[in-house]
Image (cartoon, rainbow, N blue to C red):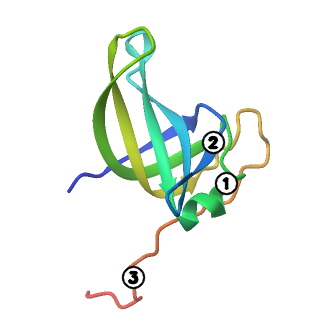
Amino acid sequence: MNVISFLGRVGNEPEIKKVGDNDVLEFSIANNVGFGDKQITNWFRCALWGKRATSLNGHISKGKELFVTGELSMRTYTNKDGVEKLSADLRLGAVQFTSGGDRGDSAPPQQQRTTPTDDDGDMPF
């Protein structure tokens, strides 16, 4: 199982694209770890696919705080200067809006799960 979950802020305005017959919503998200002068920011390239991409397009914007869960993959690429770089790519399975909202936003968005639950309401204990 390859699952990562974290809280972060959207770093750019999302862009919706067509890949074959599918829609994909792409954006970056920053996650801070550590504290003080030891704090670092990790950047992840995120992708939402299919109906979730179209339903959340327009609701996710730069600066929004999100709790995301997805499958992490690392890939290498060569930038325009010919330097090999490493990219952390996240195929999102769930997105939840937090009470953090936008920076400076006084009215946080509602929480929204983008994956169905398997809970049938019947607890085994």
Residue marked by disc 2: 14
Residue type marked 3? Asp
Residue type marked 2? Pro
Residue 67 visible in image: yes
Q: Which corner quadrant of the image does residue 27 belong to?
A: top right
* Vertical position of residue 12 compared to residue 96: above or below: above
Q: Position of residue 52 (x, y in %)?
A: 56, 63
Who comes first in sequence, dot 1 or dot 3?
1
Of badges 1 and 3, nearer the viewer stands: 1
Image mark for residue 57:
1
Depth order, front residue of 122/125: 122
Of badges 3 and 2, nearer the viewer stands: 2
Residue type marked 1? Asn
Depth order, front residue of 7/77: 77
* 87 left or right of 14 in image: left
Q: What is the distance, in whole Å, between disc 1 and disc 3 at their CAs?
A: 27 Å
Please say if the residues under marks 1 and 2 sit with CB atoms less than 8 Å apart.
Answer: yes
